[in-house]
């Protein structure tokens, strides 16, 4: 049974991770709303995306999220009632639990394990990183031509970004991507199957893997990033056909599904805060290596990048895969355990 509260998605046009969650929502035909922010049309700190997108800005500040006392730096973010989920992997996992009987779910434990391996391969195995490095940073449409975008991503990564440095690592990124394209062409899709797990329709494995390739092959701003002589459709016909099939299926489901309601930040805040209730009982592992207990005041932040932005609250849930804290507004903030850091503070809350 679906939750009573329609999910609210915070995302921006051009975000590959957001595109992954949108693909999932559309393929599952899950009704969702989205938080819209009126954005500036010009000015020294504007980004090209802001002139056409009125969803969330691709750079800080993001007042709609800050009004919920969420410091988490990255996007997408999903709110369901008084629960706020960060990280695209956790968002999809939560939706799979909240909306059961998923036709995208793997059909066996072996398929489920393969799906998780593929997800890790794409997110943590460097595929998206190399997709970014392969981008045409010299093109006027590249966000790296925008000083505000570069400054924002320097704060996010904690390192200086220069066009010369990006150009220097591009050949290595292209070589890595050629290996990945070949693994898909000769391996996973090599027997002529239409979908990665061999079923009659896309599965979570396709959702987990396809999004960087859609970004590379279908995004106007990435045109010219992949050299034609090395990455042509003639060289990788199965990969190109797979991407086209996925995009066509997602577009079909998008047209058939309900359009999201667009809510401004005030409406979202009122709706989310209006769903507060009594503290919910969640599992807290007694044998967790960190030695944490229910009610401990903790800080949670990303451990890979964006770690300067920390969220504080009382620990209310801790499993192998997920940590949940309750912030000072009474909202439940959900984060994955993988590549996230939990720091215990001295004070213990009464919950």
Image (spheres, grey):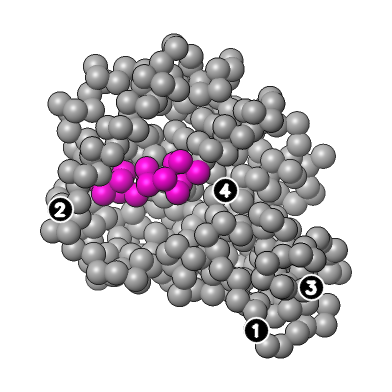
Left or right of 177 in this view: 346: right
Q: Identify the disc placed on residue 345.
A: 1
The residue furthest top is 192
The residue depicted at 33 percent of the width and 54 percent of the height is 49
Image quarter hosting the N terminus: top right
* Circle 4 residue: 89
Q: Residue 31, percent across and down?
A: 66, 41
Please indicate, yes or no, whether residue 13 appears anywhere in the rendered image. Answer: no
Quarter residue 242 falls in:
top left
Q: CA distance from mark 1 to mark 2?
A: 42 Å
The residue depicted at 46 percent of the width and 41 percent of the height is 121
Q: Which residues are the magenta region?
A: 120-135
> SS class of the residue under badge 1?
strand
Mark 4 or mark 2, earlier in chain: 4
Q: Residue 155, percent across and down?
A: 35, 71
> SS class of the residue under badge 4?
helix
């Amino acid at each position: 049974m679906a939750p009573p509260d329609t999910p609210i998605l915070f995302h921006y046009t051009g975000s590959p991770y957001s595109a992954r969650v949108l693909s999932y929502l559309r393929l599952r035909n899950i009704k969702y709303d989205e938080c819209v922010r009126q954005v500036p049309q010009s000015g020294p700190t504007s980004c090209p995306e802001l002139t056409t997108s009125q969803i969330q800005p691709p750079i800080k500040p993001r007042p709609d999220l800050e009004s919920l006392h969420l410091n988490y730096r990255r996007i997408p973010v999903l709110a369901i009632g008084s629960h706020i989920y960060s990280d695209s992997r956790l968002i999809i996992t939560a939706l799979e639990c909240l909306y059961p009987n998923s036709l995208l779910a793997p059909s066996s434990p072996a398929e489920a394990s393969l799906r998780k391996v593929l997800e890790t391969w794409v997110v943590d195995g460097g595929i998206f990183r190399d997709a970014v490095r392969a981008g045409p940073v010299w093109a006027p449409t590249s966000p790296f031509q925008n000083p505000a975008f570069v400054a924002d991503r320097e704060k996010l990564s904690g390192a200086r970004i220069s066009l010369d440095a990006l150009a220097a690592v591009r050949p290595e990124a292209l070589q890595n991507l050629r290996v990945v394209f070949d693994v898909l062409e000769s391996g996973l899709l090599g027997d002529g199957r239409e979908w990665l797990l061999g079923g009659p329709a896309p599965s979570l494995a396709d959702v987990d893997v396809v999004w960087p390739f859609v970004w590379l092959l279908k995004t106007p701003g990435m045109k010219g990033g992949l050299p034609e002589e090395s990455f042509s459709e003639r060289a990788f016909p199965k990969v190109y056909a797979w991407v086209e099939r996925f995009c066509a299926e997602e577009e079909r489901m998008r047209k058939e599904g309900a359009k999201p309601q667009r809510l401004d930040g005030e409406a979202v805040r009122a709706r989310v805060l209006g769903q507060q209730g009594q503290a919910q009982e969640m599992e807290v592992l007694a044998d967790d290596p960190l030695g944490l207990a229910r009610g401990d005041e903790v800080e949670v932040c990303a451990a890979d990048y964006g770690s300067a932005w920390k969220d504080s609250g009382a620990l209310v849930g801790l499993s192998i895969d997920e940590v949940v804290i309750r912030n000072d507004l009474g909202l439940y903030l959900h984060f994955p355990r993988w590549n996230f850091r939990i720091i215990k503070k001295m004070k213990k809350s009464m919950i």
